[in-house]
Amino acid sequence: MIPNFDTFSTRYLRAARIPVVLVSALLTSSLLRNVIDISLWEMLAGLGTICLSIVWSMMRDGRGYWVYTVYTMRVYETPEEIARRIEHLPLGGASRLFYQPLGASLVTLGVVVALSLAAWLCGPQYRYPLIGLLGVVLLPAVMLWQLYRSIPFLIRQAMMIHKDKASHTPRPRRLPGCLAEDLLLGLLINFALVLPIGRKAEFSLAAGYGNPAFIVAFMILLTIVMLFMFFFAIRPRRYVLLGDMLIGNIAADFAPCAPWSLTARLTRPWRLVIWLVVVALWSVAICLLFQAMELPQSFVPFYLCSLLPIVLIYCAERYQALYDNYLEAQEMRQRYETVAAAVNGKLNKA
């Protein structure tokens, strides 16, 4: 039996709980481990970038996903209910704060600031437990509430486009732009969570870049960073791309070139093994290089330089993932158009 919008929305929210809570909890645990003597700015930057990346991604992908859901008839609703939803739910004004990426992100960041200030005023003895409470419980609840509030608006938007495609102004996007947006979100989180780690004793540069203890600690750090970036890079968006494709938001030249031959030829597990080896060797090499060049001992510029191969790995993997999702979306679109043409043909004969 095909569910109605309310039933499908409930399932959608339930499915979103685990990834939202899991990602927020993992990143918050990194913040707690990495930052000693946390400042208010570091607390706001850490929790803010975590929530920004999650909410922005949910709202950005929401329109494409619900267009895909409506167009492919994964839900069924009576004509009266569809008319009611279209007529009685405005999409302009303050409503944009609930479903547009920028508006929803600003609302969430406002909540982050308010809750962080409240936690900060409770005193240093409660600071880290309260950060854990915020990142694992309260802020995921806020983000899921934002998602819950966005669903009716995204459904109405999808139904309006399905009813009258001319009401929608296409904004074609290309793969490099999508990749750059995802990379920016990933780097914001990376900088907020990792740069303060230089204050920890394990990453002290008092003994120089060539200190064996520092090299081992830095190798472990870069490996963890690479793993986080790798798994963020392979996140699928096939259904979102299909929805955007159906309403003209995917450019005809979406992928300007084929992926790198290495990522296209090797399976993902083998690529992960290669990247782990590359990052391990790179972490040792850059430590020895900075030591040999007798560069100033400063963790932040050193870390930023060391991040270059990981950024390249992320770009290669994200490009491959989006390219594969694009091909899958094209195939699904062809099947959808074939079925839609057959149904319309039968209706016309009737």
Image (spheres, rainbow, N blue to C red):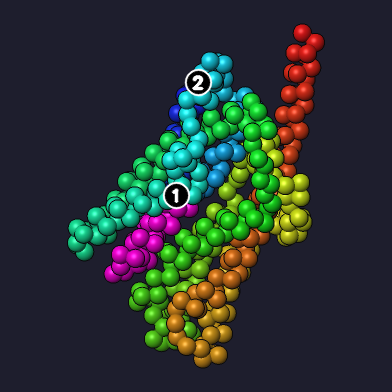
Q: Position of residue 169 (x, y in %)?
A: 65, 40
Q: Image quadrant of residue 83?
A: top right
Placement of 186 over or under 345, stated as above or below? below
Residue pointed to by mark 2: 84
Which class describes the residues within 10 Å of circle 1: few (<14), some (14-19), or many (20+)? many
Instruction: Write down the region rendered in magenta.
Output: 27-54
Residue type for callout 2: Arg
Residue type for callout 1: Ser
Q: As rendered, which of 84 and 244 lies closer to the eye?
A: 84
Q: Residue at x 72, y 29 (%)?
A: 336
Is residue 190 at least partly visible in the picture?
A: yes
Q: Residue at x 60, y 45 (%)?
A: 236
Q: Residue at x 61, y 58 (%)?
A: 180
Placement of 350 over or under 94, stated as above or below? above
Residue pointed to by mark 1: 105
Q: Position of residue 234 (x, y in %)?
A: 60, 51
Q: Quadrant of the N terminus?
A: top right
- SS of the residue under disc 2: helix
Placement of 24 over or under 218, stated as above or below? above
Q: Image quadrant of residue 29?
A: bottom left
Q: Position of residue 119 (x, y in %)?
A: 25, 56
Q: Residue at x 39, y 39 (%)?
A: 145
Q: Is residue 125 left or right of residue 320?
A: left
Give the CA distance from mark 1 to mark 2.
28 Å
In magenta stretch: residue 46: yes
Q: As rendered, which of 285 and 329 lies closer to the eye?
A: 329
